Amino acid sequence: MDVELIKYQNADDVPRNRNYKFRIGIRHIQLLYMFLICGAMGVLRVSPGVAMLAVTDTSRINDTYIQIKNWDRKTQGVVLYSFFMGYAIMLVPGELFLKRIGGKYTLAVALLLNGGLCVAMPTVINKGNVLAVSGMHLFMGMSQACVSPANRALLDKWLPPHERSLFGRIIFMGLLLGMILALPVIGIISEARLGWELIYYSLAMMAFSIGAICILLTANSPNKHQAVGDTEKEYIAVAKNNMEKIVMENKERKYQNTNGNITSPPIPWCQILKTSQFWKLAFSHVSSNTVFVFCLSDMPLYLQNFYPTLRENTSWMAIFYTMWLLMELLGMIASYIYNHFFRWNEIPFRIVFSFSFIGITCGLPILPYLIPDWNITAMITLMTILASLSVQTHAVMKNVKEMRDMDPGTVLMLTSTIASLAGACIPLLTGFIIVDKMNMHRWRYLFFTLMTIVLFCQAAYFILASCSKVSSRNRVKRGYHLTGYDNSSELLEIKSNHKTEHEAEKI
């Protein structure tokens, strides 16, 4: 799920020769609502892993009157696997079809669905079986995959092209901020007499409240919002029209069919899957996402070796996510400076990318040897892993921008699906290996397995990166697609510098 940042970073501003004066308007109030909605979805995203520990916290059997389940880690892994698998299987349908529905209704349905599932979750856990609980987590995960296409659909409608990149990233920060604030609050709620049941009821109340705000106070477009004045509507429309003119001027974006009509070229799915550039990006994406899912779902279990109480556990998790958020901010600043004042060079980039792999592969084997003594070494190790993960995220973005012979949005959609499917298996892997959380040998097996996955992806990345580029006769037919992780201005700068196929043949 680390792909959320990439979705919003895969956007470039309009060409530098067009200047637009920034104006504050009603659209920025709508962005505040979107930020709030993303924060709520971040709370719902981080809650399954922590709530599962509260459901199975046997230390509270005599401290509360609610049922405490004696589920082993395999059972917990199956439930968490269902959540992440739901996210993975909904990525492609969500990206291809949900933009047609409208962002407002998609977000409202996602929030209300999560609210209903959270209300029913205590009853299902107490009266039902693991299969029923897994099914409910599957639907919760599927709703999470709907957030990004809905947000980008709203950004396309509400913002002029030159504002989408910046505010898209700010909205993503709401997702991380929701995760950070949720962890210590969930830890505090878990100590109440209602325990884990109160966690789900609180999540339901939050989801219903934010869903009501989404329905009553937001709109799909400025034309459907009564408070938006004509001046602001004209400002947005003019900026969009100028961008569309540039799009139409680029002959690569469209082609004429046999009837002479201008249509969009079809997406060459098979040809994309046959290219080495695609699989290079897929392996780097799998590497970062597997580590991210482990931190999201199983890191609280690892921290229980240092802090048995869930309150202390979640507080430390919040600190780590806060530091990770700062790393992401610094990475964005560094990426902006490098892209605008320097030129990317493949050799220095591979060196930076290699250091990120080294940080993860060296940090993971160290962690099991730090149990049970929590010290500065453990903190530095975890921060190194998160910092390296942030570098890999920005590296994936750089790779996406170099996909000049393919549609970068479609490529990123497919690699995100592959990475999410691989990441969904991590809770299952943890469940089968960590039979006893106090067994240090089991933790060593797990961390060395994760290190092996990262090393394998690193080797595959560098092997594929060293392969020659696809010959011109096998290249994917270039065209402009509003699909995948694209919005209408994302690939403008990327593709505006490309030559047409006719010019390329002359060269």
Image (cartoon, rainbow, N blue to C red):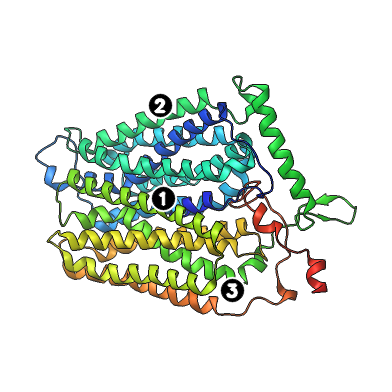
Does label 3 or label 1 sit earlier along the sequence? 3
Residue 149 in percent (x, y) is at 56, 44
Residue 206 visible, this orientation: yes
How far apart are labels 2 and 1 at the CA level?
30 Å
Q: Residues within 10 Å of mark 2 (few under 14, many from 20)?
A: some
Q: Residue at x 28, y 68 (%)?
A: 363
Mark 3: secondary structure: helix
Q: Is residue 71 left or right of residue 78?
A: left
Three-letter code for the amino acid on which mark 3 is drawn: Ser
Residue 146 visible, this orientation: no
| Residue 453: quadrant of the picture | bottom left
Query: Which numbered tag is attached to residue 80?
Result: none
Query: Which numbered tag is attached to residue 209?
Result: 2
Instruction: Indicate the quadrant containing the C terminus: top left, top right, bottom left or bottom right.
Output: bottom right
Q: Are marks 2 and 1 in contact (CB under 8 Å)?
A: no
Q: Residue at x 71, y 74 (%)?
A: 474
Vertical relation: 394 (above or below) 488: below
Looking at the rendered image, the disc whose residue lies closer to the viewer, 3 or 1, is 1
Mark 2: secondary structure: helix
Residue 389 in percent (x, y) is at 38, 61
Q: Residues within 10 Å of mark 3 (few under 14, many from 20)?
A: some
Looking at the rendered image, the disc whose residue lies closer to the viewer, 2 or 1, is 1
The residue where tag 3 is placed is: 276
The residue where tag 1 is placed is: 329
Residue 400 in percent (x, y) is at 57, 61
Does label 2 or label 3 sit earlier along the sequence? 2
Residue 350 in percent (x, y) is at 48, 72
The number of discs equals 3
Q: Residue at x 79, y 51 (%)?
A: 249
Q: Residues within 10 Å of mark 1 (few under 14, many from 20)?
A: some
Mark 1: secondary structure: helix
